[in-house]
Image: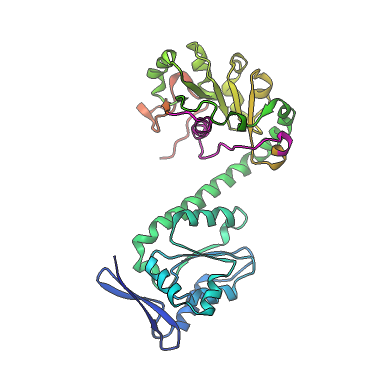
């Protein structure tokens, strides 16, 4: 808890913020030699390149940020995370023209909100410059606000891991995905985007069928469904057809060859609308006889279809895409079946929808 904030002047002429928190007081900066504190901060950054971006914990009175702006590359962006709103307020109340000029700098962002940190990461940190993201506190800020900054550190770490995993996946499958994208082009003329289907099932329940082990004991309930929209992934399609249930939508987002192997010999038997990511194996599109709904982040695809593109990303599982599909359709409530989120009875999938490939599980 912040008891008080003061603005003091250091012995070498800098304005420094003093914080009273939890019965102790500390400075964001140095009251004795702020210039040296700034030099230590800049030295901790190391060499600066055109690919660098910076996330700095601690606003202080922007003494260190001024020097960072003057030393960084013109392409670099700076995000300052300040957990103490009182610090931001005292800076704004006492800002002179120089401080206001720093605050208005187009490459500087100041926030205390997680969603703004997420925005910064998604807009300025990508695969090409991920290794040049510098994350560092100013003048002991990480020690004094250790608890407050942890959620931000977790967010940054998760973004880093997600980006790295996605990049590693692309590196492994890029040749296969590129070939599939070229082969899939011919089926675009038969496809629509999801936009015309938005809210067409407003207020209707949706049942999302996943392949968790609990599907074995619950799948029979689907035969008793009343007015519900059934959304299936490729792995559970055959299981549904075997009990006489043809889903309303079939969602396939994995562009690997395994997507076709999961529906081979029975995709031609369904009348479900196929919701697919552009680049899935062409054999799926060739065998499927119903309506086709495509989504892709590619602007060329959007221009060809001349419709607004609704993307169904949101996680690493087809269940995420199926859930987003139900939301776009306007369904309410959304019911999950076979979505165990666990290795129930040490099983990977339902026996009705078991994988033909061995499970590799990290211990």
Please give the name of the residue rendered at 55% of the width and 27% of the height, measured from the top-left corner: 200
The answer to whether residue 314 is magenta is: yes
Q: Is residue 296 above or below residue 72?
A: above
The location of residue 183, given as percent across then percent down, is: 73, 30
Give the total number of marks visible in the rendering.
0
Q: Is residue 158 left or right of residue 7?
A: right
The stretch in magenta equals: 303-332
Please give the name of the residue rendered at 58% of the width and 64% of the height, measured from the top-left corner: 77
The colour scheme is rainbow
Q: Is residue 15 left or right of residue 103?
A: left
Figure quadrant of residue 226: top left
Please give the name of the residue rendered at 63% of the width and 44% of the height, measured from the top-left corner: 171
Q: Is residue 14 above or below residue 136?
A: below
- Which image quarter is the N terminus in? bottom left
Q: Is residue 124 visible?
A: yes
The location of residue 11, given as percent across then percent down, is: 41, 88
The location of residue 274, given as percent across then percent down, is: 60, 24
The location of residue 140, given as percent across then percent down, is: 39, 72
Q: Is residue 337 above or below residue 315?
A: above
């Amino acid at each position: 808890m912040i008891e008080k904030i003061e603005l003091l002047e250091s012995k070498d002429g800098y304005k420094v913020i003093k914080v009273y928190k939890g019965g102790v007081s500390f400075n964001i900066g140095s009251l004795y030699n702020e210039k040296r504190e700034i030099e230590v901060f800049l030295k901790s950054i190391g060499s600066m390149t055109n690919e660098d971006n910076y996330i700095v914990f601690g606003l202080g009175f922007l003494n260190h940020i001024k020097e960072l702006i003057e030393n960084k590359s013109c392409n670099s962006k700076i995000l300052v995370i300040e957990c103490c709103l009182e610090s931001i307020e005292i800076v704004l109340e006492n800002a002179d023209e120089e401080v206001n000029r720093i605050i208005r700098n187009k490459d500087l962002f100041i926030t205390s909100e997680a969603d703004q940190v997420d925005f910064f990461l998604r807009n300025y940190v990508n695969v090409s410059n991920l290794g040049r993201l510098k994350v560092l506190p100013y003048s002991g800020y990480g020690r004094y606000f250790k608890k407050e900054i942890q959620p931000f550190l977790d967010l940054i770490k998760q973004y880093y891991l997600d980006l790295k995993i996605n990049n590693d996946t692309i590196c492994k499958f890029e040749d296969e995905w590129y070939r599939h994208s070229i082969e899939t082009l011919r089926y675009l003329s038969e496809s629509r985007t999801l936009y015309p289907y938005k809210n067409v099932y407003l207020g209707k329940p949706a049942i999302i069928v996943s392949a968790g082990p609990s599907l074995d004991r619950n799948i029979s309930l689907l035969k008793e469904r009343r007015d519900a929209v059934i959304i299936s992934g490729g792995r559970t399609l055959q299981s549904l057809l075997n009990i006489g249930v043809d889903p309303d939508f079939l969602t396939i987002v994995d562009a690997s060859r395994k997507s076709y192997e999961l529906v081979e010999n029975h995709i031609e038997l369904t009348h479900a609308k196929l919701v697919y990511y552009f680049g899935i194996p062409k054999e799926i599109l060739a065998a499927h006889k119903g309506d086709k709904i495509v989504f892709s982040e590619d602007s060329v695809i959007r221009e060809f279809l001349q419709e607004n593109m609704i993307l169904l990303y949101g996680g690493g599982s087809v269940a995420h895409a199926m859930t987003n599909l139900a939301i776009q359709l306007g369904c309410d409530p959304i019911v999950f079946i076979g979505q165990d989120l666990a290795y129930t009875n040490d099983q990977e999938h339902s026996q009705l929808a078991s994988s033909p490939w061995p499970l590799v599980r990290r211990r």
